[in-house]
Image (tube, grey):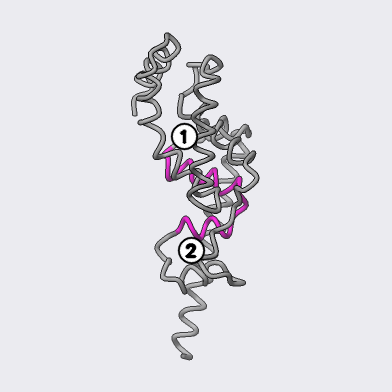
């Protein structure tokens, strides 16, 4: 995605070209929805947060500073909307994964071993999960993640490091437990 294209579309929208803002919406709405679904209990909550994000982006477009990436700015709005929405929670819906003491075992039992994001969501604090999502799912640089989350660069780097380490340890622990149960089973 070309940053200069985003800046041109923002400039067009600020000049009164609604089609330019529509192009920004088309460009970001699916990505934002995926991101908001990771922070919501259901798709409807994520859609509500997405709508609020887009409305606020349009309403406050004049406050966008082109020295930063547009994606950083709009994700920051999405993060705030997700936090503001009382129904947004950092838990996986009960119908997606059965409740269990060990979330990783729950993922495996539900045939979700390959879905690392569900595991990460269950194991990590919401801010750490958000940092990992923005970095790996959205391919956002650390500096943009820090700005989007209103955190420092060191905090962001530490969150990414600790999140990866927690997931790696949880996966290794689960594999060890599976090996033992297969050996004795």
In the rendered image, the quadrant that contains the N terminus is top left
Q: Which mark is residue 96?
A: 2
Determine crowd level at label 1: few under 14, some 14-19, many 20+ residues with C-alpha closer than 10 A.
few
Judge whether 94 appears above or below 160 on screen: below
Q: Is residue 150 left or right of residue 30?
A: right
Looking at the image, residue 136 sits to the left or right of residue 163; the answer is left
Instruction: Please report the residue visible at 41 percent of the width from the left and 35 percent of the height from the top.
Output: 29
Query: What is the magenta range?
Result: 116-139
- The residue that label 1 is drawn on is 141
Q: Which of the two labelled residues, at mark 2 and mark 1, occupies the earlier sequence position? A: 2
Residue ranking furthest to the top: 15
Nearest to the observer: residue 19 or residue 155: 19
In the image: residue 2, left or right of residue 33: left
Callout 1 secondary element? loop
Q: Residue at x 45, y 88 (%)?
A: 183
Q: Could you tell whether 179 is left or right of 56 in the image?
A: left
Q: Main secondary structure of the magenta part?
A: helix
* Residue 14 pos. (x, y %): 45, 12
Q: Position of residue 44 (x, y in %)?
A: 50, 47
Q: Residue at x 46, y 80 (%)?
A: 179
Identify which residue, 107 or 184, lies in the foreground. Answer: 107
In the picture as drawn, the residue positioned furthest to the bottom comes out as 184
Select label 2 or label 1 by which is in front.
Answer: 2
Residue 72: % across, % down:
50, 29
Q: CA distance from mark 2 to mark 1?
A: 30 Å
Q: Which mark is residue 93?
A: none
In the structure shown, which secondary structural element does the residue marked by tag 2 occupy? loop
The crowd level at tag 2 (other Cα within 10 Å; few <14, some 14-19, many 20+) is few
Where residue 48 appears, as percent x and y from the top left, is 52, 40
User: Residue shown at 46%/24% (left/top)?
Assistant: 69
- The answer to whether marks 2 and 1 mark residues whose Cβ atoms lie closer than 8 Å is no
Instruction: Give the answer, above or below, for where 127 lies relative to 51.
Output: below
């Amino acid at each position: 995605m070309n940053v200069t294209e985003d800046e041109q579309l923002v400039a067009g929208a600020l000049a009164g070209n609604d089609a330019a803002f529509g192009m920004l919406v088309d460009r970001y709405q699916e990505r934002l929805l995926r991101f908001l679904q990771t922070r919501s209990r259901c798709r409807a909550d994520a859609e509500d947060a997405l709508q609020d994000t887009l409305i606020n982006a349009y309403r406050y477009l004049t406050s966008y500073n082109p020295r930063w990436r547009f994606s950083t700015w709009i994700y920051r709005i999405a993060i705030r909307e997700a936090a503001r929405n009382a129904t947004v929670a950092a838990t996986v819906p009960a119908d997606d994964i059965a409740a269990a003491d060990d979330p990783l075992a729950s993922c495996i039992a539900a045939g979700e071993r390959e879905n690392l994001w569900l595991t990460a969501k269950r194991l990590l604090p919401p801010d750490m999960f958000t940092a990992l999502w923005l970095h790996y799912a959205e391919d956002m640089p650390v500096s943009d993640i820090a700005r989007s989350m209103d955190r420092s660069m060191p905090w962001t780097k530490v969150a990414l490091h600790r999140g990866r380490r927690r997931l790696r340890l949880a996966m290794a622990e689960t594999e060890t437990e599976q090996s033992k149960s297969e050996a004795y089973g």
